[in-house]
Every structure is written in structure tokens, then in C-alpha cells.
Amino acid sequence: MQGAPPPGMRTLCRTRRGLLLAALLSGGHTLAAAPQPPRGLSQGAPLGRCGPLTVTTNAATGAGFNADVFGWHDRDCRARVARLARPSPSQAGGYLYDLAFHADGARRLARGTNAGGWNGWGFVVLHYAQTAATTQGLPPTFSGTVLAGRHHALHRFRWRLSAGGPVDATVDWLFVTGRDEPLFAVTLDSSPAGADVVKADSRAPYGDLAFEGEPGDIGGLGWGDARRFTTRCAGALTPQCAWDYQQPNTVPFVRMWSRSVDAEQGAVQTTSDALHPGGGDYGGGMLAAHCRGRTSQTAGPGCCAEGTRLPVAWLWPYQLSQYELPFTATSHRLAWGQTYGAVGQTTYQHFGKALSGYPYQSYSVFLVLGPRTPSATLGRVAAMERLLGARLTVSEGEVLTEAPGGVGRADAVRLDVPGYDPTYATFDVRAASGRATFTLEPLAGPVDAPVFRVHGQVEPPTTFTLDGGALTPDVDVFVTHDAVRATTWLTLRATVVRPVTLQVR
């Protein structure tokens, strides 16, 4: 297409009728039609209808335990299937066992490696006092699907852990038609222990996934806190790999990639490092003083162990394969990171910032599975930067400026970006008499498949328009009405390149 796109340009996607999401687990493919001419809203995938999300409970995995299965269509209208291990008398459950998707034109299954008993990804791990409390082998106190809508589903787990005192962990998994990545949202509530009793970090989500299909050597890894760290390995990852830690970074992330397959796994936070710092300051500022802003050639004296090039293992802000790396290049460990004290302390230090981890520590990350070239993880980081720079305004109803502080919480906190709730990475408005009209302006660049929530809609809406033109459910917009919470979820099947106005009634 020549020249600048007209306001609201779009193309949408088509799949063959009757496609079963289960076919992906047996090697089936979703076929997309050729691109259609733009129709005025956004640029995206080919025109057509995406099938509804499916939820199957207590399904056999063939691995000696059952799972709750979530099937949805991603941004290209290709089927994805995730299986969450279901608690039972013989299986603690509570984690992502595997996820099937398409890559390089073929089916790929990312499955737990069971290394060290971590047979998947999404475990809660809290380190404290030279030991750890984990959900590995710990049955949840609650497990269930709290929303199973046509295009949006939420599954929740709860545990009580003992990390020097009781800590209640709540984890939500969110699946959305039009999004490639499942979202993992966690709240760690240390109020049962009382203030300043618990002094723990958080490495949730934690685990091992063979993200390339069959596990092999890791080719490299990286992370983002205030800057971006990336290895420069000639072959497999070793302690002698060169690295660069100079590029400024906005949205926290962690990633690793395969040596032999064009594949990587990553986790990307739903808000910026400035608003919710990512990564742990495990060395009391040493990482920033001796490693950050440098390279392997210019590292300070406290950065690297003698005889190696990579930073000292305990300085890494996220747990990856650093503790297995001296012995093997095949470790697929990938976890998040929050400083000691981020769980339980009224005040803790994080690279010179005074933060609070009591009574709650809440955050959310996307699980990214995709190609190494171009990086699927860095693509999601860029998408988050553009999303955080968008502006939401309302002409009918109101933009929400407060929301619960995280999953499983009732307390209202101020939203740092008006209308944007980082818990589920949604734009939120409140309807007036069941109606809402709102405008999204992509001030920082195109926003892909934005998800909106319209609160205060007791009855399901029947009319959806964009810039005055009708939107067709399942084709132009993916809709779930949550009658219990009087909320309508909307995923706009588009990349918003200019200001667009939606009306829901």
C-alpha cells in the first residue's frame, strides 16, 4: 500500500470452518486466507472469523495427571492450546505444563522439562533466609476458572506458603483471542504474617520449558531492567560468552534462546521499570556499579568471577541458567526477579530506590514463545512501550483512574496511566447507563490488538461501532460479557495506527 494509511485502516483474518483447537495437539494446522484489502481501521492479519475460546476441564494429559485446557486463536488466527496442571491427590498442579502453537509453518509444543522437578512454568518461588518456599509439590487452596467467556478466560490458583511467615499467593492466567501470549498475574500477600516479619524475594513465575520443542543447547540469554543485557556467544552459552549491558531499557523483560532452533522464551512485564521495577538488586547495588552500562570488556572489578566473563551468578537480577551453566548449556530455567524484602517488608532498597513490599507485591508478565529472529520477546517489549504511551479519553462514561492493586485484591490504587490497568494489560472505562464511547490515541506508535474492559454493563451489549462504522463480533472485535462482574471485555482485532473512537451499547 502506498502512502500513509487512512484513519482506522484494518485488515482482519479468516480461518477454515470447523477447525478444532485440539487438532493442534495432534499436529493439525490453522490455515489463513490471503490478505484482503484494507478497510479503514488497522493493519493486521487477513479478513475472516476467529472461532471462540474453549475451556476443557480435567482432561487427561497422558503424563499421569490431568489438566485444564485453554484453546484460543492468536493474532494470526492460528490455534494455540495451553494446559494447566490440575491439582489432584497425586499431583499438586498449579502451573503451565505445556503450550502448543505454530512456528516456522509447523506445530511446536513447548513442554516442561521436569529438570529438578520443574515440569513446566509458572511456579511461585520465594527465597528467604538461605532457603525457599515454593508451590512445587504444594497443592493450591483454590483452583478454578473464574471467567470462561467467548474470547477471554481467567484461571486462578491460590496457595498459602511459609516464607518465614505465612504468605498468600494468588495467580491468574489470562487467555485472550487475538493475543499470542498468555498473561501470568501474581499477588503475594504477607499481611497474614504482619509487617516486616517476612523478608523474601519473588522469582515467580519460575520453571523450565523446552520452548524449542526438543531441548538442546541454549545459545544465549538476556534481560531488561534499567538497561538491556544480552550475551554474544559464538556457540552454546558458556561462562566465557561476551556480553553487552549498555542499551537503555523501559519495560522489564527476561529471555533465552536456542542455539540450533530459531526459538526463544521470554517474560515481559505489563508496565515500565520506572512504575514497577523489574529484576532483583541481589548485590546491594553492585550490579549497577560494576556491570550495568558496560560490556564484558569494560566490566568493573566486582562484576565477574575470576576466570569467567559473565557477571557473578548471584548478581543476576533474574534467575536463568546461571547456577547450572558451569556444568551444562542445556538448562532451560527462566524466572522473574524481585529483591529480598519485596515480599513482606514495609521498606526495602532496590538500586537506590526505597520501595514497599507490604502488605502486597503484585505484578503481571506475558509468557512469550516465538522466534529468536526477530526476537518475539523484544517485539512484545516494543508493543508494551507503544501501549503505555497511548492515551484513552471518554465522551460517554468515564475513564477509570483507580483499580484493584492486583489479582485477588480489593484495595483501590491509583492507575499510573489513566485508564490502563497493568493487572491484565487492559484499557478500562465505566459505562454510563450501560453505554460507553471512548477514544484511543496511539501517541507512541501503533497499538496492536488492544483489550478494553467496559465496567458497569449489567446486560450484554449488542452494538459495537468504530468511528461510526459497525463492528462484527468474532470478525472485527472479540467480545466476552462477564455477567457476574457486570463487565464487557473487548479485543479490537486491529493495529490502531491513528486515533479511533469505539462505542459500546
Image (cartoon, rainbow, N blue to C red):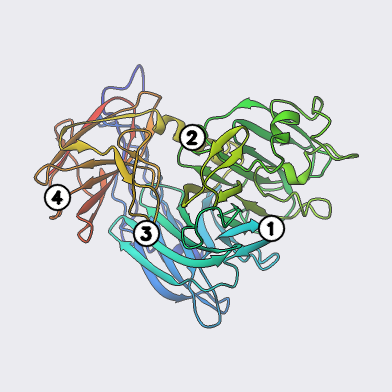
Sooner in the amino-acid sequence: mark 3 or mark 2: 3
Rendered residue at 58%/57% (across/down):
198
The answer, for residue 475, to whether it is visible in the render is no
Sooner in the amino-acid sequence: mark 2 or mark 1: 1
Of the two numbered discs 1 and 4 in the rendering, the one whose residue sits closer to the viewer: 1
- In the rendered structure, the answer to whether residue 243 lies left or right of residue 206 reads right
- In the rendered structure, the answer to whether residue 20 lies left or right of residue 308 reads left
Circle 1 residue: 129
Label 3 vs label 4: CA separation?
21 Å
In the depicted structure, whether residue 272 falls above or below residue 445: below
Which of 256 and 251 lies nearest the eye of the viewer?
251
Whole-percent x and y of residue 28? 47, 61
Circle 4 residue: 461
Circle 2 residue: 272
Rendered residue at 37%/32% (across/down):
447
Q: Identify which amino acid the numbered label 3 is placed on.
A: Leu
Tell me which corner region of the image, top left, top right, bottom left or bottom right, holds residue 252. top right
Label 1 vs label 3: CA separation?
34 Å
The answer, for residue 370, to whether it is visible in the render is yes
Helix, strand or loop at label 3? It is: strand
Circle 3 residue: 154
Q: Identify which amino acid the numbered label 1 is placed on.
A: Ala
User: The N terminus appears in which quarter of the rendering?
Assistant: top left
Helix, strand or loop at label 2? It is: loop
Sooner in the amino-acid sequence: mark 3 or mark 4: 3
Residue at the right extreme, as displayed: 307
Rendered residue at 38%/70% (across/down):
56
Which of 14 and 281 lies nearest the eye of the viewer?
281
Q: Identify which amino acid the numbered label 4 is placed on.
A: Pro
Q: Identify which amino acid the numbered label 2 is placed on.
A: Ser
Helix, strand or loop at label 4? It is: loop
